[in-house]
């Protein structure tokens, strides 16, 4: 580690301006009173910052942490006006430090370029605090720690040109990021000695590689793609990395009568949470005889069979980024490489194949992690015993903690990764505050965590887990703390996922809480003192209410809307589509059945995948509720869901409900890893969504069934 120190420097001009700003000398000839007490303070200011921290303004007469008020501020028993004098610094270059009257401003980002990882810059400011008669010395020692990281390149860089391109230009810094946002330089481009030909090149001042493709134009065969390989380096002020470069030169010619392709190499990108993307594959292709353009021989990564989420309709290619939720990590990307021919309906095909590269970018969809909490407990700095002072684990410690021995983050409690959280006892209280700072209107959130019980004793054996808020003063809203739940299953030595839904829609339980924050509680609250022993891991909150359920629906032909007089598969009872005031709904009668009625709705091929997560939305109405139960009551009746290939299944994490005689909308989460009966490659199976209505002699209307993927 290198510590940067420089010689002492007197800030005379600054001291003078501070004294003037604090009052200076007044007029008149009276003799000022002599103070008998010296100013006092609670200790020197000693603070450490990372080079990535934001601007900070410290009060030189403030607390030992530079705050304007609080314990340790400068005081004077005589009530005199206080000034700062004799200011000295150990630095000759005060870049990043700004003296403004009685305040010291700190700009770590201005110091960052001079620091590498673990290098430090220490600025020691000494000064006197005077009341005009007596002085007290104080110092402010500020240390900035460097955090330098190497540039990172996403993948190999690829440049595509036709042989008639003339001068081809490639941005050598495309897809390269530097965590410090330092200037980057590309250099040392080296051609592979096995390249078929030599293309002259230079690097310009904008880090672009200029290739004179015209030199090899006549050597590129008709209809063929010739590949040239290179390596080069990228550096910041300290690190350098190697990267591969691939240059493809396509030998194409204009065929009379065939469409003219103005651009053979198409590129597009989308984020994984974006809606379905549509690409016109005939874009920038012109048929000079005005024949209709058609797309032939489409392949994705060399395969003619398109996976779920990719469809070709005429000349339009649609890509659903949600189909790749399970494949792309945060900050990573996946490239879908399409090749196809451009032809016209008269049978004339343009020379060569056109390409489309679609990059799907992974995002941070876990709102718990995005809020800065150690959601998977993998931060090694928090491993070990937890307490309210030395290692909070990132939690706010609540009031109920008097029977919570030895909470800790350890390896034995890990479900994934290396670490998980262990808690035991009968009274524990941990909170994560502001995992969402402002709830969105008409939004849905799914909050989940994984639980493994070594012991769970009595009705209150499992942890009590509220999702709650802070309501404005004077509000009639409940903060919902005591509306939390315990996971119903008290099984031992198995991992279980507990999911709770927040819905701010018009019929949602959280309607009216828009703009308020959301907190997560993890409690043991057990008056019986029966105790319990629990491992917790993988906290997760995702939002999905803004997804277009029609665009992303995995059910085949929107069968869950029951609008097309489909025959619905069931295992008994009466199941038929009926017209109800001009609306088509599925009528189900379980009368006379032994185990109720299961209806099965077909799912698009390949939609369900190992490791996937899904949300099901269902409108259900128990129309003869007042016959089965007390009329006018709001009796809650459950029904179940699963995904199945006919042999194995994936159970839902919760149940659907009806409430009284009213139409009730349910959101049910299905997590493949949690609910699967066996390890199956579901993408290769014929899958159905099954609704299991087990209530005896019950009559239902079912409608608006949607199945979508969620992160």
Image: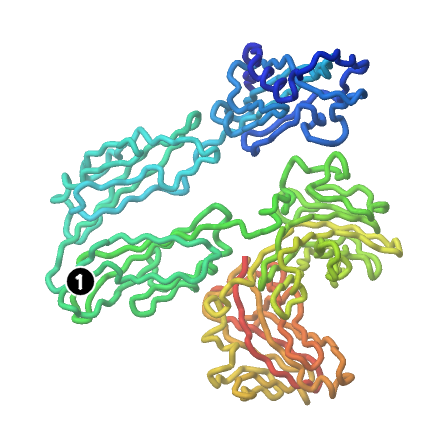
Q: Dividing the picture into quarters, in which one does residue 256 lie?
A: bottom left
Residue 551 in the image: state x and y as whole percent. Answer: 46, 67
Between residue 132 and residue 516, name the one nearer to us: 132
Residue ID for mark 1: 259
Q: Residue at x 75, y 11 (%)?
A: 31
Between residue 390 and residue 455, name the one nearer to us: 390
Q: Which quadrant of the rendered structure holds the C terminus?
A: bottom right
Residue 484 in view, yes or no: no
Q: Residues within 10 Å of mark 1 (few under 14, many from 20)?
A: many
The residue furthest right is 528
Q: Which quadrant of the rendered structure holds the N terminus?
A: top right
Residue 307 in the image: state x and y as whole percent. Answer: 41, 63
Q: Residue at x 60, y 64 (%)?
A: 670
Residue 394 in view, yes or no: yes
* 695 over 125 or under it: above or below: below
Total marks in image:
1
Q: Is residue 122 left or right of residue 309?
A: right
* 347 over 329 or under it: above or below: below
Between residue 132 and residue 680, name the one nearer to us: 132
Q: Residue at x 52, y 87 (%)?
A: 582
Residue 286 in the image: state x and y as whole percent. Answer: 19, 62
Q: Is residue 696 left or right of residue 213?
A: right
Between residue 375 and residue 130, name the one nearer to us: 130
Q: Dividing the picture into quarters, in which one does residue 353 lie?
A: bottom left
Q: Residue at x 68, y 88 (%)?
A: 591
């Amino acid at each position: 580690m290198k510590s940067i120190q420089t010689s002492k420097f007197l800030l005379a001009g600054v001291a003078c301006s501070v004294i003037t700003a604090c009052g200076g000398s007044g007029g008149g000839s009276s003799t000022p009173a002599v103070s008998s007490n010296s100013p006092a303070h609670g200790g020197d200011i000693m603070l450490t910052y990372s080079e990535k921290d934001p601007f900070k303004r410290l009060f030189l007469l403030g607390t030992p942490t530079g705050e304007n008020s609080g314990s340790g501020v400068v005081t004077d028993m005589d009530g005199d006006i206080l000034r700062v004098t004799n200011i000295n610094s150990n630095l000759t270059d005060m870049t990043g430090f700004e003296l403004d009257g009685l305040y010291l401003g700190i700009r770590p980002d201005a110091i960052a370029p001079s620091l590498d990882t673990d290098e430090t810059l220490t600025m020691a400011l000494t000064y006197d605090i005077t009341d005009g008669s007596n002085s007290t010395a104080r110092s402010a020692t500020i240390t900035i720690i460097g955090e330098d990281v190497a540039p990172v390149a996403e993948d190999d860089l690829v440049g595509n040109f036709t042989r008639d391109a003339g001068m081809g230009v490639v941005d050598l810094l495309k897809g390269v990021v530097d965590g410090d946002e330092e200037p980057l330089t590309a250099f040392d481009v080296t051609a592979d000695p096995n390249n078929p030909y030599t293309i002259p090149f230079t690097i310009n001042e904008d880090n672009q590689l200029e290739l004179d493709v015209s030199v090899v134009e006549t050597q590129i065969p008709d209809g063929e793609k010739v590949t040239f390989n290179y390596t080069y380096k990228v550096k910041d002020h300290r690190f350098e990395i190697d990267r591969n470069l691939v240059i493809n030169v396509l030998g194409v010619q204009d065929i009379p009568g065939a469409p003219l392709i103005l651009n053979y190499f198409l590129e597009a990108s989308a984020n994984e949470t974006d809606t379905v993307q549509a690409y016109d594959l005939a874009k920038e292709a012109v048929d000079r005889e005005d024949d209709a353009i058609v797309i032939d021989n489409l392949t994705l990564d060399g395969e003619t069979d398109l996976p779920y989420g990719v469809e070709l309709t005429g000349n339009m290619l649609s890509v659903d980024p949600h189909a790749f939720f399970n494949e792309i990590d945060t900050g990573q990307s996946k490239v879908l490489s399409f090749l196809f021919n451009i032809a016209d309906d008269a049978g004339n095909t343009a020379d060569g194949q056109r390409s489309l590269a679609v990059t799907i970018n992974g995002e941070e969809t876990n709102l718990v992690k995005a809020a800065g909490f150690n959601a998977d407990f993998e931060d090694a700095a928090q491993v070990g015993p937890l307490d309210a002072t030395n290692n909070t684990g990132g939690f706010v410690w609540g009031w109920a903690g008097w029977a919570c021995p030895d909470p800790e983050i350890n390896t034995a409690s890990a479900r994934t990764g290396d670490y998980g959280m262990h808690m035991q006892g009968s009274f524990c209280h941990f909170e994560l505050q502001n995992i969402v700072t402002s709830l969105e209107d008409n939004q849905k959130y799914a909050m989940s965590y994984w639980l493994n019980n070594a012991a769970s004793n009595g009705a209150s054996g499992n942890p009590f887990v509220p999702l709650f808020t802070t309501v404005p003063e004077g509000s009639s809203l409940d903060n919902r703390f005591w509306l939390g739940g315990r996971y119903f299953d008290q099984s031992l030595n198995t991992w279980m996922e507990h999911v709770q839904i927040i819905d701010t829609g018009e019929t949602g339980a959280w309607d009216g809480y828009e703009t308020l924050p959301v907190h997560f509680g993890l409690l043991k609250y057990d008056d019986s003192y029966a105790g319990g022993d629990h491992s917790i891991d993988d906290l997760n909150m995702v939002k999905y209410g803004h997804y277009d359920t029609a665009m992303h629906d995995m059910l085949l032909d929107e069968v869950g809307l029951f609008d097309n007089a489909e025959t619905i598969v069931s295992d008994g009872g009466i199941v038929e589509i009926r017209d109800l005031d001009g609306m088509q709904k599925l009528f189900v009668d379980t009368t006379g059945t032994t185990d109720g009625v299961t209806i099965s709705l077909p799912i698009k091929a390949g939609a369900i995948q190992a490791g996937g997560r899904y949300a099901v939305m269902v409108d259900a109405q128990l129309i003869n509720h007042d016959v089965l139960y007390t009329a006018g009551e709001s009796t809650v009746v459950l029904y179940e869901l699963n995904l199945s290939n006919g042999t194995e299944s994936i159970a839902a994490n919760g149940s659907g409900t009806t409430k009284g005689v009213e139409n009730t909308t349910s959101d049910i989460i299905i997590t493949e890893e949690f609910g699967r009966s066996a390890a199956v490659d579901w993408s290769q199976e014929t899958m159905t969504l099954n609704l299991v209505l087990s209530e005896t002699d019950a009559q239902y209307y079912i409608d608006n069934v949607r199945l979508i993927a969620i992160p």
